[in-house]
Image (cartoon, rainbow, N blue to C red):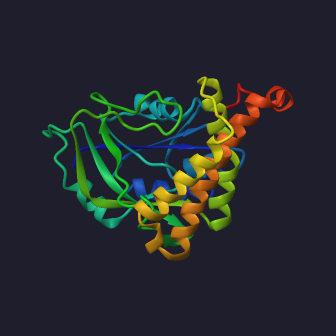
Amino acid sequence: MTNLTGVVITLNEADNIEDCLASLARVCDELIVVDSGSRDDTIARAEALGARVIHQPYLGDGPQKRVGPLAAKHRWVLSLDADERLTDEAVAAIQALDLETTQHDAYALRRRNFVGSRWVKRCGWYPDYCLRLFDRDRTGFSESRQHASVQAGNPQRLNADIEHYSFANLGELFGKASGRFSNRAAKIMFLKGKRANAASPALHGANAFVRKYVFQGGCLAGLDGMSVSLSAAVNAYLKYAKLLELQRDAKVHDAEDFDRVW
């Protein structure tokens, strides 16, 4: 099997980093953690598991995820978020690859997204293909500072899953949607020159709910389907409401630090 480098970006991930690195260590002989200033035990726990820690103030999603691959010993890099884990089938699928002769520059794995211990299979949450294994000499993460992805020219999908423990509970699902997710999105839109009108929050919120609950099958996923759909609606409503607030309220605008988007 080709030698692999496993890379994770972190900020205060003490509760996740050990399981993530242990998962990567099943197929990777080098582990790199790119940390953006953790104040908990993330760094100590990572180093205890043999990871090399690179200290890097946060640059945004894509630029941050490009740091580790540039420092890797090996061409092939497996990038996971701290709350992601390889399944047994993913380990087997990766071990079966012939990366020395492949024409593919990246491989995608399906992602199982969880709320608590509950796998949500509807609402567009599965199959959620993500390019995670790639040849750093031929491709890498985009420069996008929000939701970056690997920009592969000839990828292939693997018939295997990773697990993503996205939210610890429903409170966290709604808390992130109404808090930092919508705050960041509103600031990014404002800086890009995007503008909202009085109808924008309601229209975008309703559209997000209908898309998740009706067209992506949330109605078939019980309480979790309803909750994921509602949280998407809350996030969409609030990011446009906050964008409109930045436009209309000078006091709110002047109190915001636009240099701290990330």
**Rendered location of residue 27, percent (x, y):** 33, 53
Against 96, is 79 above or below? above
- The residue nearer to you, when weighing 85 against 194, is 194
* Residue depicted at 46% across the width and 36% down the height: 148
| One can see residue 17 in this view | no
Question: In x, y percent, where is residue 180?
Answer: 68, 45
Most extreme residue toward the right is: 251
Q: Is residue 58 visible?
A: yes
Residue appearing at x 34%, y 45% in the figure: 131
Of residues 172 and 6, the one nearer the viewer is 172
Between 224 and 214, the residue placed more toward the observer is 214
Relative to 28, is 157 on the left or the right?
Answer: left
Q: Position of residue 144 (x, y in %)?
A: 48, 30
User: What's the residue at 53%, 53% (across, down)?
Assistant: 208
**How many numbered marks, from 0 up?**
0
Find residue 60 and report its image quarter: top right
In the picture, the quarter occupied by the C terminus is top right
